[in-house]
Structure formats: structure tokens, C-alpha cells
Image (cartoon, grey):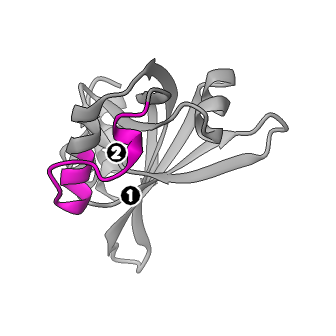
């Protein structure tokens, strides 16, 4: 996908958290909540390199993110954005990224947790392969591909 639609960028730019789904070694889902930003049409977040999600992504880079909007559509369904993609892990730490996330989600200038400077931190960049869900991003995506 060449770019995110304006409605998808608006939701990703809000303080809505992303639910990240990765696959455990036995194939069962592993779910966690992360703070995200968009950089160069990729979804970016940081985490511990020893976390389940990081270990899972090293083994299988397939990832799904679900972000819930605060708005309901005309039928009463909660709008949500679903992003399927492939993750790429880079060694951290990345204090600037972590501070940017803390500013977005908490209004702080400095990320309050040790992960900000942790030697085992990683940066996860998600290349977007498919967008779905309920909301204006679905219609915008169909128009791009159609």
C-alpha cells in the first residue's frame, strides 16, 4: 500500500491504542496493547526485545493491529481500523521514539518507563499490507485499489 488514507491517519494520530496480535509458537494468538505512531507509511512502536510479541515477530513477522475509534457508524457499529502487515524489528533503544509516544499518549516530554533507554529494547516497524475494519478507511482503501 502506497499511503494511508486521511481518515486512517487521523485515527492513528489520535490517542487510541493499538491491540497487537502475533502468533505464539503453538499458533495461538498473543495480544498486547501498544502505543503507535506513523512514520513513512509504516506503523511504529517500541517494546522490550524479550517480550512475547518481539520473540513471536522474530519467528513470524506477520502482525495484525486493531485500533478502535470512538465513533459509531450509522448502523450503530463501533468504527475500528484493522491493519495486517509484516513487522521488521530494529535494535534499540530509541529514546526519541519513546518520548514521542509518551507525548502523544500522556502529554509528557519524557517516557516514564525504563524501556525508554533499555539496552534490550527494539523498534517495530509494520509495513502495511491490508486495511479493513468498519469506517471510512475501508471505502478509501477500496477506491485506491479499484
Q: Is residue 122 magenta?
A: no
Between 7 and 16, the one lying in front of the other is 16
Helix, strand or loop at label 1? It is loop
- Residue 80 is marked as none
Q: How many residues crowd around disc 1 within 10 Å: few (fewer than 14), some, or many (20 or more)?
A: some
* Dot placed on the residue nearer the N-terminal end, 2 or 1: 1
Q: Mark 2 and mark 1 in contact? Answer it, CB < 8 Å.
A: yes
Classify mark 2: helix, strand or loop. loop
Front residue of 108 and 135: 108
Highlighted magenta segment, given as a residue range:
101-118
Question: Residue, x 23% and y 61% (percent of image)?
Answer: 106
How far apart, in angstroms, are the residues tagged by discs 2 and 1?
7 Å
Residue lying furthest bottom? 76
Q: Residue at horizontal 36%, vertical 25%? A: 1
Residue shown at 75% from the left, 39% from the top? 24
Per the image, the residue denoted by label 1 is: 17
Q: Does residue 27 lie above or below 134 as drawn?
A: above
Q: Is residue 4 above or below residue 65?
A: above
Residue 83 image point, x, y percent: 46, 42
Where residue 112 appears, as percent x and y from the top left, is 30, 53
| Residue 17 percent coordinates (x, y) | 38, 57
Quadrant in the picture for residue 5: top left
104 within the magenta span = yes
Q: Is residue 22 left or right of residue 142?
A: right
Q: Residue at x 33, y 77 (%)?
A: 74
Q: Mark 2 sits on what residue?
A: 36
**Image side of residue 80 versus residue 55, left or right:** left
Seen from this angle, which residue lies furthest right? Answer: 26
Q: Is residue 57 left or right of residue 146?
A: right
Q: Is residue 128 visible?
A: no
The crowd level at tag 2 (other Cα within 10 Å; few <14, some 14-19, many 20+) is many
Amino acid at each position: 500500500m502506497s499511503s494511508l488514507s486521511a481518515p486512517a491517519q487521523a485515527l492513528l494520530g489520535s490517542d487510541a491504542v493499538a491491540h497487537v496480535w502475533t502468533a505464539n509458537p503453538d499458533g495461538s494468538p498473543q495480544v498486547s496493547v501498544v502505543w503507535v505512531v506513523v512514520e513513512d507509511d509504516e506503523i511504529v512502536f517500541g517494546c522490550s526485545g524479550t517480550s512475547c510479541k518481539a520473540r513471536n515477530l522474530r519467528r513470524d513477522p506477520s502482525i495484525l493491529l486493531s485500533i478502535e475509534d470512538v465513533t459509531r457508524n450509522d448502523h450503530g457499529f463501533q468504527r475500528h481500523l484493522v491493519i495486517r502487515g509484516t513487522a521488521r524489528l530494529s535494535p534499540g533503544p530509541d529514546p526519541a521514539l519513546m518520548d514521542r509516544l509518551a507525548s502523544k499518549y500522556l502529554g509528557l516530554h519524557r517516557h516514564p518507563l525504563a524501556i525508554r533507554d533499555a539496552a534490550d529494547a527494539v523498534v517495530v516497524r509494520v509495513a502495511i499490507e491490508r486495511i479493513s475494519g468498519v469506517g471510512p478507511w475501508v471505502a478509501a482503501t477500496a477506491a485506491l485499489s479499484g
